[in-house]
Amino acid sequence: IIVKMASPNGGDDFESSLLSFEKLDRASPDLWPEQLPGVAEFAASCKTPICNSPPKWMSDLESEDIEMLKELGSLTTANLMEKVKGLQNLAYQLGLEESREMTRGKFLNILEKPKK
């Protein structure tokens, strides 16, 4: 390609000097690499029609479970953290209660294996 410097006085010369006759082949992956790897494959996989059926994991949920998910999804971050802390405290309390009951069962010989 030959590039000529345009003179500010010649209008046609200036415009013709800006023209480029180079042919760009966009089919070559080496010249035009994919900007985000995997996007073309993802786009091709998304061309299948989207069905309106719920995901498989959601089909096993009952209406109470779905309501709980909606409730948890509407909580703010602080409220969600408070809810998680409450569940952790509840799990700890249940663990303590189970430990007491197991100790009680041990003293009462409830869990003893029968002799043959």
Image: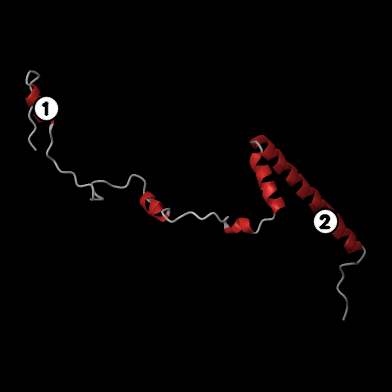
Amino acid type for the residue under numbered disc 1? Glu
> Is 1 on the left-hand or right-hand side of 107?
left
Q: Mark 1 falls on what kind of element?
A: helix
Q: How many numbered marks appear?
A: 2
* Residue at mark 2: 98
Q: Mark 2 falls on what kind of element?
A: helix
- Is 53 above or below relative to 82? below
Q: Residue at x 9, y 19 (%)?
A: 8
- The x, y position of residue 80, in whole percent, is 67, 40
> Is 17 on the left-hand or right-hand side of 105?
left
- The x, y position of residue 50, in whole percent, is 48, 54
- The x, y position of residue 21, in whole percent, is 11, 39
> Is 40 on the left-hand or right-hand side of 83?
left
Q: Which mark is residue 34?
A: none
> Is 57 on the left-hand or right-hand side of 10?
right
Q: Residue at x 56, y 56 (%)?
A: 53
* 1 or 2: tag closer to the N-terminus: 1
* Residue at mark 1: 15
Say which quadrant the C terminus sits in: bottom right
- Is 101 above or below relative to 39? below
How many residues crowd mark 2 within 10 Å: few (<14), some (14–19), many (20+)? Answer: few
Which residue is more in the foreground, 93 or 35?
35
Amino acid type for the residue under numbered disc 2? Glu
- Residue 107 appears in which quarter of the rendering? bottom right
How many residues crowd mark 1 within 10 Å: few (<14), some (14–19), many (20+)? Answer: few
Model colouring: secondary structure
- Mark pair 1, 2: CA separation: 88 Å
Say which quadrant the N terminus sits in: top left
Q: Looking at the image, which residue sits at the far right?
A: 108
Q: Residue at x 41, y 54 (%)?
A: 47
